[in-house]
Image: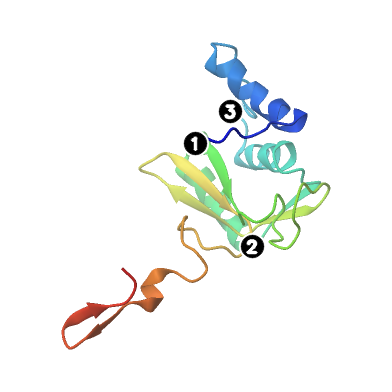
Amino acid sequence: MRHLGHNEHDLALAEPFRTVANGGPLQLLYKDTDSVEEKIESIARKIYGAGEVTYSKKALRQLKFIAQLGIGHYPVCITKTQYSFSTDAKAYGPTEGFNMEIDDIVINNGAEMLVAVAGNIMRMPGLPKDPQANHIDIRDGKITGPS
């Protein structure tokens, strides 16, 4: 088994997880009673380093709908590109002070969770840019392609 080296930055990032795993206090980013906007902005600023959060017209309509439904107490997560901390897939590494535009807010009522969608992304995780399904075909009633 190959041992992976650790640098001080890796250890600093892991410390909060180690603390909680050893029974230490869990520090949440927001309170259940915070507004949906406060929850989104807390995540955007504290996790991703956003300087500003703006909302599309569609997201603003969803915020009103969420208020009408009385489900603003649901937890919130943000889905965005996996290639960057910002919403720009080409901005590698940590970024600070960018505008995170929330394009939509998806209500997952069964799970009691709200998902703020930032940027144009595919929401199904784990698919490569060129999935193997692109290389599978049926010829003469038999499946052909990668095995």
Kind of residue at badge 1: Tyr
Q: How far is mark 2 from mark 3, CA to CA?
A: 24 Å
Q: Which mark is residue 33?
A: 3
Q: Which residue is mark 2?
A: 57
Q: Is residue 40 above or below residue 129?
A: above
Which quarter of the picture shows residue 147?
bottom left
Which residue is situated farthest in the right direction here? 97
Q: Earlier in the sequence, mark 2 or mark 3?
A: 3
Q: Left or right: 128 with respect to 103?
A: left
Q: How far is mark 3 from mark 1, CA to CA?
A: 9 Å
Secondary structure beneath label 3: loop
Which quarter of the picture shows residue 10?
top right
Kind of residue at badge 3: Thr
Judge by depth and name the residue closer to the eye, 20 or 123. 20
Q: Residue at x 63, y 29 (%)?
A: 30
Judge by depth and name the residue closer to the eye, 115 or 24. 24
**Image coordinates for residue 134, horizontal then vertical, percent:** 40, 76
Q: Earlier in the sequence, mark 1 or mark 2?
A: 2
